[in-house]
Image: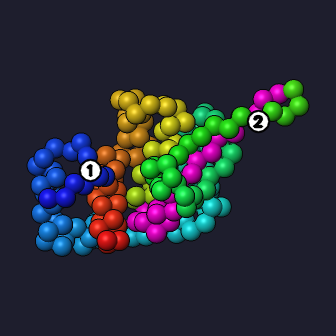
């Protein structure tokens, strides 16, 4: 059995089930059946509006976002699917901070639930920097099905990697 890099850390019985789906050639079909609906967020302006709407609904009092965009280099260079950064710039005698969220372009063509999962993940980092209990509690508050979406996103990325071979 080949190692599944997106599923490292999951228990052996879960990995065995995933390997069985792969060997039977049913992983893609299962994901398509469950998450067949694609989203309509095609460009950076639409992505900004989508993220801002989620932020306004769940994190009204958090810091404002300066930029939200799809990043084609993200997955390859940073080994991440999304990033959140705080950029400080000097303007006159003041320091101005701006927050950015970048989402890997792989999510431009992904099912709607997977885009929502990565956006929720990056928005949660506005309040909680570390991946701790409070962070995952906030993710589940914004998207109650967060943990299932995260697992299924990992399956989706595994399927994409296998198709690329």
Q: Give residue 97's quadrant in the image.
A: top right
Q: Residues within 10 Å of mark 2 (few under 14, many from 20)?
A: few
Bounds of the magenta segment:
94-112
Name the residue furthest top: 93
Q: How many marks?
A: 2
Residue ID at (46%, 63%):
106
Q: Is residue 35 magenta?
A: no
Residue beneath disc 1: 7
Q: Nearer the viewer, residue 154 or 121?
A: 154
Q: Closer to the camera, 148 or 24?
A: 24
State the image coordinates of residue 158 (x, y, percent, origin top left): 30, 61
Image position of 100 (left or right of 7): right
Q: Is residue 104 above or below residue 63?
A: below
The x and y percentages for residue 108 are 50, 65
Q: Which residue is labeled 2 in the image?
A: 89
Can residue 119 be seen here? The reply is no
């Amino acid at each position: 059995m080949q190692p599944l890099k997106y599923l490292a850390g999951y228990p052996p019985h879960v990995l065995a089930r995933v390997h069985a789906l792969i060997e039977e050639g049913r992983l893609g079909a299962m994901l398509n059946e469950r998450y067949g609906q694609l989203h309509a967020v095609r460009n950076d302006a639409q992505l900004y509006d989508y993220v801002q709407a989620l932020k306004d609904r769940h994190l009204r009092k958090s810091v404002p976002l300066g930029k939200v965009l799809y990043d084609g280099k993200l997955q390859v260079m940073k080994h991440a699917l999304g990033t959140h950064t705080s950029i400080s710039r000097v303007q006159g005698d003041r320091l101005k901070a701006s927050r950015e969220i970048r989402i890997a372009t792989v999510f431009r063509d992904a099912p709607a639930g997977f885009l929502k999962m990565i956006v929720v993940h990056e928005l949660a980092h506005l309040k909680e920097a570390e991946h701790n209990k409070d962070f995952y509690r906030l993710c589940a508050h914004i998207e109650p099905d967060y943990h299932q979406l995260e697992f299924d996103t990992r399956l989706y990325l595994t399927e994409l990697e296998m198709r690329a071979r």
